[in-house]
């Protein structure tokens, strides 16, 4: 079913939906259970069984059953992450950062991705730093110039703080269970 959408944010090569397609073809849910928390396993097993039962009733029924199952799987997976389910997205729509992360996994090398991210972060730090340092030169010229410096300073410091928090605390990713 090449036209069936998948959730944005999961790559086509190794996504929950790609795994679900394969599981439905094999009639074996086992390979999908990695995508959900243990407490949600039965919900996925039940939806899988219902989908298998309906799929045999023709092409339209198969497409509808598959879509139901894909949506259920992604919704339950997202709930396990503590993330909102926003629906399935058309195939091929994935955020650039996620596509790059998936590409690194496929290549079994993170060097290119890490270098691109490091360069992007470096450029943003420099841009904010330069703006703050330029505004600082004129901060005492007037109240307005001082406010412009403070605004640039706050943007610069908050950006650094955000990066530091992400590096030391990790990216925000909610899980109900460890």
Image: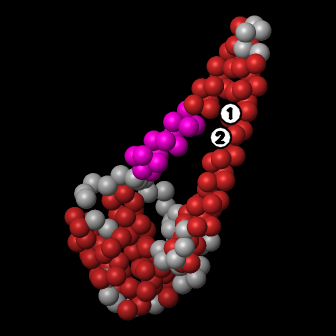
Specify whether residue 163 is painted magenta: yes
Q: Which residues are magenta?
A: 158-172
Q: Whole-Å distance between the Cαs marked 2 and 1?
A: 6 Å
Specify whether residue 49 is painted magenta: no
Q: Is residue 139 above or below residue 22?
A: above
CB under 8 Å between callouts 2 and 1?
Answer: yes
Q: Residue at the location (49% across, 42% down)? A: 164
The residue wearing badge 2 is: 125
Q: Residues within 10 Å of mark 1 (few under 14, many from 20)?
A: some
Q: Residue at the location (66% across, 51% down)? A: 120
* In the foreground, 52 or 104: 104
In the structure shown, which secondary structural element does the residue marked by tag 2 occupy? helix
- Quadrant of the frame with the C terminus: bottom left
Please identify the residue farthest to the top as the structure is shown. 142
Coordinates of residue 77 in the picture (x, y in percent) = 37, 64
Coordinates of residue 95 in the picture (x, y in percent) = 60, 61
Q: Is residue 89 left or right of residue 137?
A: left
* In the foreground, 24 or 112: 112
Instruction: Residue 171: tell me if it is visible.
Output: yes
In the structure shown, which secondary structural element does the residue marked by tag 1 occupy? helix
Q: Is residue 40 left or right of residue 162?
A: left
Instruction: Residue 5: tell me if it is visible.
Output: no
* In the foreground, 31 or 71: 31
When asked about the image quadrant of residue 73, the answer is bottom left
- Quadrant of the frame with the N terminus: bottom right
The residue wearing badge 1 is: 129
Q: Residue at the location (68% across, 15% down)? A: 147
Coordinates of residue 27 in the picture (x, y in percent) = 34, 90
When asked about the image quadrant of residue 81, the answer is bottom left
Most common secondary structure along the magenta stretch: helix
Q: Which mark is residue 44?
A: none
């Amino acid at each position: 079913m090449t036209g069936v959408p998948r959730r944005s944010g999961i790559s086509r090569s190794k996504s929950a939906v790609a795994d679900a397609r394969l599981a439905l073809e094999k009639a074996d849910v086992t390979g999908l259970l990695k995508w959900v928390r243990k407490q949600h396993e039965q919900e996925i097993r039940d939806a899988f069984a219902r989908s298998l039962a309906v799929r045999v009733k023709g092409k339209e029924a198969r497409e509808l059953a598959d879509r139901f199952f894909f949506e259920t799987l992604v919704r339950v997976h997202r709930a396990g992450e503590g993330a909102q389910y926003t629906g399935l997205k058309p195939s091929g729509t994935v955020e650039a950062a996620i596509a790059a992360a998936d590409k690194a996994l496929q290549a079994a090398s993170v060097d290119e991705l890490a270098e691109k991210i490091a360069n992007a972060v470096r450029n943003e730090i420099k841009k904010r730093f330069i703006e703050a340092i330029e505004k600082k030169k004129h901060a005492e010229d007037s109240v307005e110039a001082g406010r412009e410096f403070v605004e640039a300073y706050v943007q610069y410091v908050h950006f650094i703080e955000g990066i530091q928090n992400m590096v030391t605390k990790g990216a925000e990713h909610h899980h109900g269970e460890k």
